[in-house]
Image (tube, helix red, strand yellow):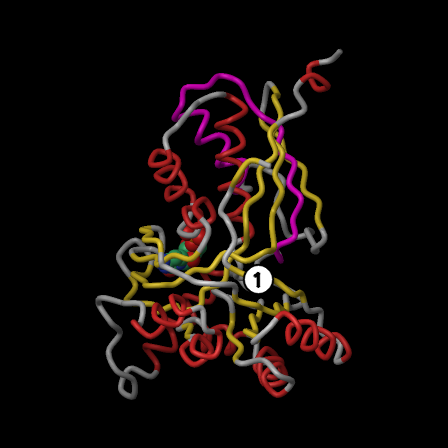
Amino acid sequence: MTLVEEFPGVRVRAPGKINVFLEVGARQEDGYHELATAFQAVSLFEDVVASLSDGFSLAVTGSVDTTGVPEDDTNLALRAARLLATEAGYGGGAHIDIRKDVPVAGGMGGGSADAAATLVACDALWGTGLSTRELHSLAARLGADVPFALTGGTAVGTGRGDALNPALARGRFEWVLVPGASGLSTPKVYRELDRMREEHAEHISPVSDTPTVSADVLHALRAGDPRMLAEVLHNDLQAAALRLRPDLGEVLDFGVREGALAGIVSGSGPTLAFLVESRQDGYGLQQRLARAGYEAIHAHGPVHGARIV
Ligand code: C5P
């Protein structure tokens, strides 16, 4: 029996996310923005299998278009594996197989989920035995959204989005997601927001030094009430994403006309997230979007974070 047959690897599943609320504060000296967000992990998953290898390598497949995903050392999952090996003093390597269901460069944290899943998979594969706190700190070094992909559920993120506190959420929220044909670059969307804020500085209120998740959002999550949440969905990045991709505005209007309680750009976009009242309404909206030529995916949240399956 070969090593591979004896030990086929460790499989970890990690979720994509929606920011049901995102307030962006001022740009800091390091280029990042202080923010306050409420994340919800949704039932679109990345599957990562890590297997033993002398070096580090990666293969990416999936139900979504993966052509934009780098397979070299710039891939966040490979960086996660290398970072863990270095920090844990592990001398070997891993082959990472990723199967993606989260839209690429879609604002749903797919790359962050890959990195979180890789940390958990390699930790188990190599027996490095890091604590949750240590994994969280490595995750934060890889990207602002990586810690949330580790924890999943519903959580409030502050700082860069990586300082997490769990939020109480009752029941299950139903979402219809429209991935959008091509991705948006996150740094570009933040830059556009900065540009718009400078341009309109005289007309808008000053940017908050201490962004905060609205109490109404936390209340709606706690109540498990989609109608209440629909009233308070908010994303400061939405205006910037719509400036770069005006076509998204039409799809948002269409979704709401066709039965969504509300629609929002997910993270930096271009994925759109429509909140619906029930699973039945979700299937109805999905069909109407599909008939109008938009790819639409039905998902629900909250779901668990990165875990071995
Ligand atoms: O941390 P991550 O690599 O996911 O962030 C991608 C980019 O998004 C950053 O390089 C930065 O331009 C922008 N960003 C930001 N402020 C945050 C999070 C991300 O400006 N809090």
Does the magenta run of residues contain 85?
yes
Residue at 34 percent across and 39 percent down: it is: 137
Quadrant (top left/top right/bottom left/bottom right) for the N terminus: top right
Q: Ligand 1, what quadrant?
A: bottom left
Which of the pair 183/107 is nearer the observer? 107
Does the magenta run of residues contain 139?
no
* Residue ranking furthest to the left: 209
- The amino acid beneath tag 1 is His
Residue 208 sits in quarter: bottom left
Residue at 38 percent across and 26 percent down: it is: 87
Quadrant (top left/top right/bottom left/bottom right) for the C terminus: top right
Residue 205 sits in quarter: bottom left
Element type at mark 1: strand
- Mark 1 = which residue? 300
* Residue ranking furthest to the top: 1
* Residue ranking furthest to the right: 291
Which of the pair 258/252 is nearer the observer? 258
Instruction: Give coordinates of residue 209: x percent, y percent.
Output: 22, 67
- 60, above or below 158, in the image: above
Magenta span of residues:
76-103
Which of the pair 76/101 is nearer the observer? 101
Instruction: Give coordinates of residue 124: x percent, y percent.
Output: 51, 26
Q: Is mark 1 within 8 Å of ligand 1?
A: no
Instruction: Give coordinates of residue 43: x percent, y percent.
Output: 59, 56
- 111, above or below 177, in the image: above
Is residue 216 found left or right of 189 in the rendered image?
left
* Count of numbered badges drawn on the protein: 1
Is residue 108 found left or right of 20 in the rendered image?
right
Residue at 71 percent across and 69 percent down: it is: 295
The crowding category of the residue bearing disc 1, from other C-alpha atoms within 10 Å (few below 14, some 14 to 19, many at least 20), is: some
Instruction: Give coordinates of residue 85: x percent, y percent.
Output: 46, 25
Residue at 67 percent across and 37 percent down: it is: 59
